[in-house]
Amino acid sequence: MTDFTMTTDADGVATITWDVQSKSMNVMSTEAFLALNGLIDQALADAAVKGIIITSGKKDFAGGMDLNVIAQMRAGGAQAIFDGVMQMHHVLRKIERAGMDPKTLKGAKPIVAALPGTALGIGLELPLSCHRIIAADNPKAKIGLPEIMVGIFPGAGGTTRLSRKLGAMMAAPFLLEGKLSSPKEAKGAGLIDEVVAPEDLLKRAKEWVLSATDADLVKPWDQKGYKFPGGAPYHPAGYMTFVGASAMVHGKTMGVYPAAKALLAAVYEGALVPFDTALKIEARHFTSVLMNPSSSAMIRSLFINKEALEKGANRPAAADQSVKKLGVIGAGMMGAGIAYVSANAGIEVVLIDASQEAADRGKAHSEGILDKGMKRGKVTAEKKAEVLGRITATTDYAALAGVDLVVEAVFEDPKIKADVTHKVEAAVSADCIYATNTSTLPITGLAAASKRPEQFIGIHFFSPVDKMMLVEIIRGKATGDKAVAKALDFVRQIRKTPIVVNDARFFYANRCIIPYINEGIRMVAEGVEPALVENAAKLVGMPLGPLQLVDETSIDLGVKIAKATKAAMGKDYPDEAVDHVLFWMADQGRLGKKGNAGFYAYSDKGERLGLWEGLDHKYPLDKVQPSLTDVQHRLLFAQVLEAVRALEEGVLTDIREGDVGAILGWGFAPWSGGPFSWLDIIGAARAVEICRGLTAQFGPRFHAPALLREMAEKGETFYGRFGDEKAAA
Ligand code: NAD
């Protein structure tokens, strides 16, 4: 059974149905595309066929290209990619021309795309080559071109067709930001032509096929006198658009995402030439992006491996552990957020705090988020009532009867946490799993307060809980498989991405992010221009510079963590130079963004104004400033060496988790695919060489770990050595 089949009815309307038997969502493979080509040839050649409907046998049209295929395409090299893409253009162009006489523009057969639901990527590029796109009014459907989100861009004509259809300005959100729309929004934006009741979809498609005139079948760009909407680059309005777009793209991406630049170049250059040449230009830029290691690393981490982790790649075998009723202890910033995301996912929640007032405040947090959603038209009054109805805010531990998972998010104090553990265990049944959201305290130590340490686990959320997609699951020494399965099933229910790590100081994410912040602060103490530090970070793709990051997480928290770490490490503590700055800032009362004063200055309204001038007085600038690359190497190696050590020590057991966790947890340069992908891009030998230089200049914290040195000697890569499967623990 092939992915596409065709039937022709008595009225001469052929229906090509896309239905990939082995998958719940259609995705395009190379073979399927060839099969589609064959059916189109057949229908165009058959005098009995008057027109064609392309639709899906599933509730959705298509999720896009099989990204595994894209990953494989690269293996053939640039020419093979280019030839493959041109072949695709050829087929789609054949659909678009549909047998018309190129001179008279007459004689084409109408081809309509009938979309029952979601249509993404090639699932929209194929319809864009048809003469009309009709979608079912399915509010759950998402229509768009999300390729840019995984480091590529629409390369099957979507870039050229959409920009010529809408103009560069109107197409920008769909091409450059991967914006997805409901069918009605897509119709409003001009992405598709018609929205009809689901039951009328095929009827209406057939009606259109049978009534279409020759003029309906000629795309604007195939008509004489076609003008690029909004103006081509050398038109005064077009000039403004393209200059603005270039500045905007660079401002947002800092030039580190090859796909965004290439996309813009394809639109700009394509707008200056005839349509078929524009497709060729699109294909050349697409090939260059696919050949760039950044795109393969992004696809691997942000799509393939992220999905694998969400599907439970590292879940121990155990029966379904979905959470039915959740207890959350501590209704502060984190507990309130955890209660919200859980109730929003349909889970009953008992939210406990020490006072009723605090518990109610925690529940009000959900109300606030839902109200914002209502203002944006994303949440209905019924949905709000439903979600709030699932949260019981109380001080009474007896309300925990029947919960099957508890997440503790009280103050970061082992004594308070132990007390809560005792109280919870007295109130819940013996098979309830107990999780702590601690960010710094080892799980194994906290589990000592539990009667059932095999059911005790870390479930570490990031702030703000409703926005941050990563959840770090931490196995204590005694944590059993059932607890891990429970945590993973819970994370799946709330639609976040899990990584599972072993217990160690700061687990994985904080272990890597703290050295990044510290390296930035250390440079300030050395007299490096703070603006250089911040900009170097952003220019290498970090979302926030280290100084802004410590302002956002708060300087007093930094002080607290530094004191606790020093107490634990004693004379081995390596960060005195950092503390000098951090403690001084705290003494000045500059506690970060929350206090409107930190490494940055803020307005009374809390807007960030610029780096605080007082820093330069206290830490005078060195006359000779380091190069941008040196600063970037310090900031990146501070993080990636920690990731390698975490792998070496068995805290991380899977490099996929290391990469996905770094991007989702602390925004590690997404263009690189994560710390391990980045090291693979530059190569272990080069990494070791850079480490040698950094160690000589700045000290042993940059000493390359043995694993990296060994890999450099053997010429290995992380993905080569540890594969896509679990790394040897
Ligand atoms: P918070 O101070 O905002 O909230 C803590 C809440 O716990 C308060 O409402 C407090 O009244 C309540 N509480 C204290 N003792 C209690 C008790 N004995 N019984 C019931 N309730 C009690 O703190 P937070 O930022 O939400 O942090 C909570 C936990 O989450 C900490 O362990 C922290 O390390 C961890 N964490 C915080 C972040 C973050 O960014 N803030 C991120 C990840 C993890």
Image (spheres, rainbow, N blue to C red):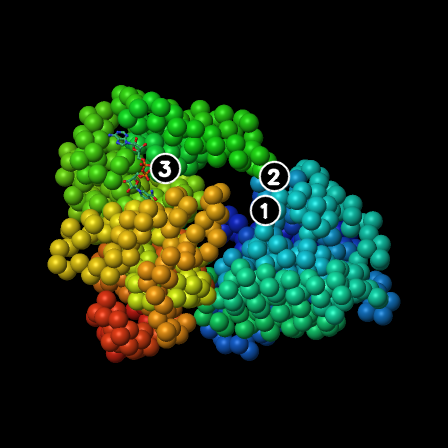
Rounded to the nearest angstrom, the CA distance separating label 3 from label 2 is: 33 Å
Q: Are marks 2 and 1 in contact (CB under 8 Å)?
A: no
In the depicted structure, whether residue 460 falls above or below residue 358: below
x, y percent for residue 399: 30, 22
- Identified at 36% across, 68% down, the residue is 621
* Front tag of 3 and 1: 3
Does residue 649 appear in the picture of this structure? no
- Identified at 14% across, 60% down, the residue is 572
Regarding mark 1 in the picture, which secondary structure is present there?
loop
Apparent side of residue 445 relative to residue 171 in the rendered image (left or right): left
What amino acid is at disc 2? Pro
What amino acid is at disc 3? Met
Residue 4 sits in quarter? bottom right
Regarding mark 2 in the picture, which secondary structure is present there?
loop
Which residue is labeled 2 in the image?
139
Does residue 616 appear in the picture of this structure? yes
Which residue is farthest left?
571
Rounded to the nearest angstrom, the CA distance separating label 3 from label 1 is: 32 Å
* Front tag of 3 and 2: 3
Q: Are marks 3 and 2 in contact (CB under 8 Å)?
A: no
Which residue is labeled 3 in the image?
333
Within-10-Å neighbours for mark 1: few <14, some 14–19, many 20+ = many
Q: Is mark 3 within 8 Å of ligand 1?
A: yes
Picture quarter with ligand 1 = top left
x, y percent for residue 136: 66, 42
What amino acid is at disc 1? Lys
Which residue is labeled 1 in the image?
142
x, y percent for residue 584: 28, 53
Apparent side of residue 438 relative to residue 108 in the rendered image (left or right): left
